[in-house]
Image (spheres, rainbow, N blue to C red):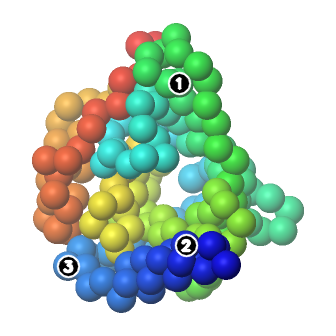
Amino acid sequence: MTRLPIITVLLFLILTSCAKKSDIDTTTVKSLDLNRYMGTWYEIARFPHSFENDLVGVTANYRLRDDGKIRVLNSGWKGTLEGEYDAADGVAKIPDPSDPAKLKVSFFLFFYADYYILDLDTINYQYALIGSSDPNYLWILGRQPQMDPKLYQKLVNEAARRGYDTSKLYKVPQPEL
């Protein structure tokens, strides 16, 4: 009997978050070579969230699975680059093959979240801007742990143009290579 109020609150939160209108421009890149997108990406900046609280040196590693889905391994260190290692294993899928840059990712059972590739270096696959229809989720990724400041600012400007509040961006400490 005590579970019912919790389930009711969770259901309400899920339904109201789905109904929320967003003024975010979620237009994704038109060209995506999924094989070239695979591999390791460094988290250059992100909006803060509880599931990445206090993580630094964060990377995302993507690998195609035999079933066509994508294995996602997010990892980082708690507090400092010498802190305790933490990792989350998940799966991503492409619901609509005609728009392969609009993915859904899950780290918990059947709960999927948006993973939209909003901007991408489609020549060399060296940077990506990842967002969601929810204005509270945004990431800047790069293939190297450090990003050229001009490129970083270009991606911040693109996110702002799309309606994200870029003042919330947190630059993730990464190791020097």
Q: Earlier in the sequence, mark 2 or mark 1?
A: 2
Q: Residues within 10 Å of mark 1 (few under 14, many from 20)?
A: some
Label 1 residue SS: strand
Q: Amino acid at mark 2?
A: Ile
Q: Is residue 73 left or right of residue 44?
A: right
What residue sits right under mark 2 in the picture? 6
Pick the quarter of the image with the N terminus: bottom right
Task: Find the residue positioned furthest to the right.
Answer: 66
What residue sits right under mark 3 in the picture? 23
Q: Position of residue 109 (x, y in %)?
A: 71, 66
Q: CA distance from mark 2 to mark 1?
A: 32 Å
Q: Earlier in the sequence, mark 3 or mark 2?
A: 2
Q: Quadrant of residue 43?
A: top left
Which of labels 3 and 1 is toward the front?
1
Say which residue appears at 35% left-offset and 74% top-offset. Answer: 133
Q: Quadrant of residue 96?
A: bottom right
Q: Earlier in the sequence, mark 3 or mark 1?
A: 3
Say which residue appears at 23% left-offset and 44% top-offset. Answer: 169
Image position of 12 with respect to 149: above or below: below
**Could you tell me how many numbered marks the image carries?**
3
What residue sits right under mark 1 in the picture? 77
Say which residue appears at 20% left-offset and 31% top-offset. Answer: 149
Does the CB distance between marks 3 and 2 fall below 8 Å?
no
Residue 177 visible in image: yes
**Which of the pair 43/78 is nearer the observer?**
78
Label 2 residue SS: helix
Say which residue appears at 48% left-offset and 16% top-offset. Answer: 81
Label 3 residue SS: loop
Q: Position of residue 64 (x, y in %)?
A: 74, 56
